[in-house]
Image (tube, helix red, strand yellow):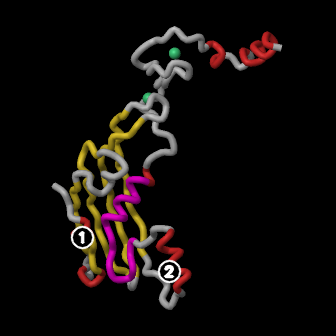
Amino acid sequence: MKMNREDLKIRLEDIPPEGLEISIEDDGGLVADVYPVLEAIVAELHLTRIGPNVRVRGGLKTTLSVDCDRCLEPFPHKIEEKMFFILMPPPSGEGEEVRLRREDLDVSFFDGEVIDLGLIIREQILLSLPMRNICRESCRGLCPICGANLNQTKCECQREIRHSPFAVLKKLKISS
Ligand SMILES: [Zn+2]
Ligand SMILES: [Zn+2]
């Protein structure tokens, strides 16, 4: 099911003293602008008030379709993340300048009254992705000459140059 982003906003005053259990299932809307979602985003969260702060505990899982950085083919990337952090309200009496800077940093998860769980889950998913997405350790990538996907086909290009660190030197000698 598709969650309405507004449903994922929790008011501080709606969290009872014993805490609030929240189950979320979202078929992709939360990150759909960045990655196609293959398995719905499921999150189980427990919110507890600690004075003006809110402790968020739980976890989320989903499977996204991510493009391999070597062969450029999409592949399923499974995500399973534990979540544990404290949300603190913005310091009171801060100037306009500080407030603007906070908005730049996209830290508007919690303004002291409303917690944006949709935004929190989205950030957790995006932050969990590695710097480089590789479909598998043995991915052979694309031929740098003809662009063929070397996982699927062999090409006739001469690529020995890439395999030996001395090949480049040899080549320099020949051409000089
Ligand atoms: Zn690949
Ligand atoms: Zn080639």
At numbered mark 1, what does the secondary structure look like: helix, strand or loop?
helix
Q: Is residue 101 above or below residue 146?
A: below
The percent coordinates of residue 7 (x first, y second) are 22, 69
Position of 123 compared to 163: left or right? left
Count of numbered tags: 2
At 60% from the left edge and 14% from the top edge, which residue is drawn? Answer: 159
Q: Is residue 75 above or below residue 101?
A: above
Q: Would you say the beta carbon of the disc 1 residue lies within 8 angstroms of ligand 1?
A: no
Q: Quadrant of ligand 1?
A: top left
At 74% from the left edge and 16% from the top edge, which residue is drawn? Answer: 166
At 44% from the left edge and 21% from the top edge, which residue is drawn? Answer: 149
Q: Could you tell which of marks 1 and 2 lies nearer the N-terminus?
A: 1
> Observer-nearest residue: 6 or 40?
6
Q: Is residue 170 above or below residue 75?
A: above
**Residue positioned most to the left:** 1
At 38% from the left edge and 82% from the top edge, which residue is drawn? Answer: 112
Neighbours of disc 2 within 10 Å: few (<14), some (14-19), many (20+): some
The percent coordinates of residue 81 (x first, y second) are 37, 53
The percent coordinates of residue 59 (x first, y second) are 33, 57
> Observer-nearest residue: 112 or 81?
112
> Does the segment drawn in magenta span residue 87?
no
At numbered mark 2, what does the secondary structure look like: helix, strand or loop?
helix
Three-letter code for the amino acid on which mark 1 is drawn: Glu
- Kindly identify which numbered label has been placed on residue 99: 2
Q: CA distance from mark 1 to mark 2?
A: 23 Å
Identify the magenta region.
109-126
Position of 108 compared to 46: left or right? right
- Kindly identify which numbered label has been placed on residue 6: 1
- Residue 176 found in image quarter: top right
Three-letter code for the amino acid on which mark 2 is drawn: Arg
The percent coordinates of residue 10 (x first, y second) are 27, 75
